[in-house]
Image: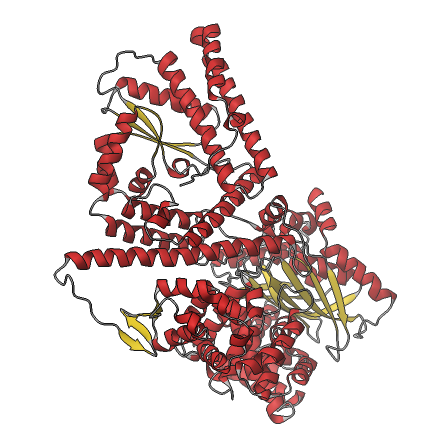
Amino acid sequence: MSTTRIPDQRAIIDRRKLASEIEALVAQHGNKSRPPVVEALKRALESGRTEMEGRLAARPSAGHAVAGGYSFLIDQLVRVIHEYVTQHTYPNANRSAGERLAIMAVGGYGRSEMAPHSDVDIAFLVGERRNAWCEQVVEAMLYLLWDLGLKVGHSTRTLDEAIRLAKDDLTIRTALLEGRYVWGDRTLYEEGERRYTREVVEGNERAFLSQKLEERNARHKRLGDSRYVVEPNVKDGKGGLRDLQTLYWIGKFIHRVSSAAELVDAGLMTQVEYRSFRRAERFLLAVRCHMHIITGRAEDRLTFDLQRQVAERMNFADRPGKSKVERFMQFYFLQAKRVGSLTGVFLAHIEDDLAKNAARKGFFAGFRPKPRLVKGYRVFGGRIAAPSDDWFRKDPVRLVEIFQIAEAEELEIHPETMRQAARDAKLIDNEVREDERANALFLELLCGRNDPEMVLRWMNETGVFGRFVPDFGKVNAQMQFDMYHHYTVDEHTIRAIGLLSQIEKGELKDDHPRATRLIHKVSSRRVAYVAALLHDIAKGRGGDHSELGAEVALELCPRFGLTESETELVSWLVLNHLLMSHTAQKRDLTDPKTIEDYVSQVQSVERLRHLAILTAVDIRAVGPGTWNSWKGQLLGELYDASSERLRLGHMRHGRKEKVAAKKGHVADLLGEKAGLVEELGTTFGDAYWIAEPVDIIALNLVHYAAARDLEHVLSVHCEYYEARGATLVTVIASDHPGLFYRIAGGIHLAGGNIIDARIHTSRTGWALDNFLVQDPHGAPFREEQQLRRIEQSISDALANRIDLTPKLAQRPLPHSRSKAFDVSPRVLFDNKASNRFTVIEVNARDRPALLNRLARVLFESRLVVHSAHITNYGERAVDTFYVTDLTGGKLVEGERQNRLEARLVEAAGDALQARLEDA
């Protein structure tokens, strides 16, 4: 596809000079010339690669020139190798008609788009099958290419075979479509070209189009189905090189173009779009070349660690509020977005062309059904279109109106009109942004009852969204350089709006029953949608995005037409959109002070309802798997407790009433064993009865009674706990210092991640500790073998049968990619979050057995851990501990707190991990 001329070709490889060197080696070594010839070829390959690396370093974005240069290098080597083999290894002066051989470059090599470690895909065309001379030459050439360390994809076929296989196999049909003559029998190659067009292409255009689109959709699905995944595949991902290639393949197959430039002549692209196509292609090719050079292999996934290095190599610089890697990735996603826009317009053109051709030939030739008019727009075949080329120029408010009508009437927007909207988006100025009608239309679209997500995505593709809401334009393609967020900010926001719409329609009732009820109880649904739009609007500006976003909301909401009270509520929601998730996941919800503090910030039932809805869609829109039943349960508990407190002005029941009510509930659950409540009721204090859910208490009492009856010194029980999407691990043992950190170490060694822990001591000196555990992927352990492994590992750890420290240091971190991020350990002490405990929060990079190491420091510092709450945000872990000293008092500020902070920072840091791994 590349039409870039390669400058100073001989600096890459001088074929004549290399051929002369090989002739001299043959003359010198005769039959034993192969080893020195291979060495000469290797030197030429390495020299060419070094030259291309230098050129890329000098011009880091010169994707076409560099990819074309690598292809040129291989071309020349293949030609020299062919001449050496046919003249010196297997000379044949009088070839028969069957002894014809043509060498074709196919795949990326055929398009002259090679990265440093791309496969060399070659098709050998031969005059006839089982021709001894051709087979010998092909084999000798392949061995020489392999000796150079090249990864070669190859096929040897006669013309008849190639044509037959191309008819049956889409991969072969595509490979031959972009086949390029390299060397050998040119007449044979040209005959193949003619036959391919006549026998494979003609009459099969529509079938090729549908097969290619099917193939593309399957590829996208496999790789995340979004061009905004934060570790994109540059080659095969959505908006990547393969999508551009697909356009070219379809254009070449249907319109017989030989280069991307000819897509303009065929009317499939405008000149501006073609330049955009080349720009995106040049950038993506350059990124891929950098990745291959950095890794020394054919790497196409732009991982977090590579993002930093490629940004550096491509000369991106830090800016206030945005690091160089974030700026590089934002530019990357803008290119991917452009590829998406081009693809939509291009494919629609192709489909229209094919439909027109079919109509001309079909039974209804000449018949044209009349489109209907909707508010002046033409609607035909489920698509809405602008009636004239100057439609938006006459009234730029129509740039918003067309998207609102499309959502309300459930229509697609005609690609030609999408192209017009993208071209005319620049007409949106301050006058249009302040236009009352334009804002009313936008708000109607945002809160649409059908599919606002899809239509807002179209609006974003054209650039209209970012022009109409410039603050949204700033987060367009803005990535968040962490392992928690799977999408760019704009994509995350649009997904959140889509999830809100699905919740309102009842489509996510099973996962979000509470939000599904609440969305119909709030006094303003507009607030819910505008808050979803604005919650991350100020990311990438430096400073706290919640505070900055709240200010943006105060400006934008009146413009959109929201009332003063709606504006105040949206601004509060944006400011506090992380409050509910942080409280639920990082605080002890059974501690009355947690609820009091939360309620004092929320202050009203209306705010609480909206915050619960926004929190659900925000977490779920982060990416697949971030929402789970565990988070749902925690948020539900927080909502119910705070709702009760807000409605009644106090907690419905005091401590005694709560304990009595729980005992009654547990007795009901135990049925025949209800007597255990009476028998063991006073063995555990009120704190236990308040802290644990009734179903866990019921399990605990049966387990505790059995352990005491059997006089077990240690009893460990594991079972799948469906209500929380986790595995419940209960340990009953004689209480002694260090028990908690040892149990945590045993669980870590068995491959478990602890997400919550509650530590209790009976009045008779027995510890009863409950842990909720998941595997490294956030799923529960269910298999009998897995559960037994956890039990055995805990037993071994408590009996000192294993040395925990070195064993834990050897365990690999599930997310080894986290090393690409800088996460400085941070320790926070809070004596106000609880009336009874000091709350210690440790923020650190996630690593093997972090909880075990932190818990050990607390034990060695003579502190008692009463509960622990563990939260993960991708590469970052936040472990929260509720502690007292040995006398039951809080840890006061001063020297002891400072020493503890220093030890916790060391335990969470990289230096200690390195020392442990060395040991």
- Say which of 493 and 771 sits in front: 493
Lateral position of residue 442 relative to residue 316, left or right: left
Q: Position of residue 101 (x, y in %)?
A: 29, 23
Is 121 positioned to the left or the right of 442 in the image?
Answer: left
For this orientation, the residue located farthest to the right is: 895
In the depicted view, which residue is nearer to us: 337 or 14? 14
Would residue 463 be visible to someone looking at this image?
A: yes
Quadrant of res 145: top left
Spot occupied by residue 532 in the image (x, y as percentages of width and height): 53, 74
Query: In the image, 102: left or right of 637?
Result: left
Q: Is residue 526 above or below residue 266?
A: below
Nearest to the observer: residue 32 or residue 885: 32
Picture residue at 67% right of the left edge, 61% below the top: 321
Residue at 65 percent of width and 48 percent of height: 807
- Please say whether residue 795 is visible from this viewpoint: no
How far across and how far down the image is residue 90, in percent?
34, 13
Instruction: Give how far across and how far down residue 439 sits, in percent.
Output: 50, 79
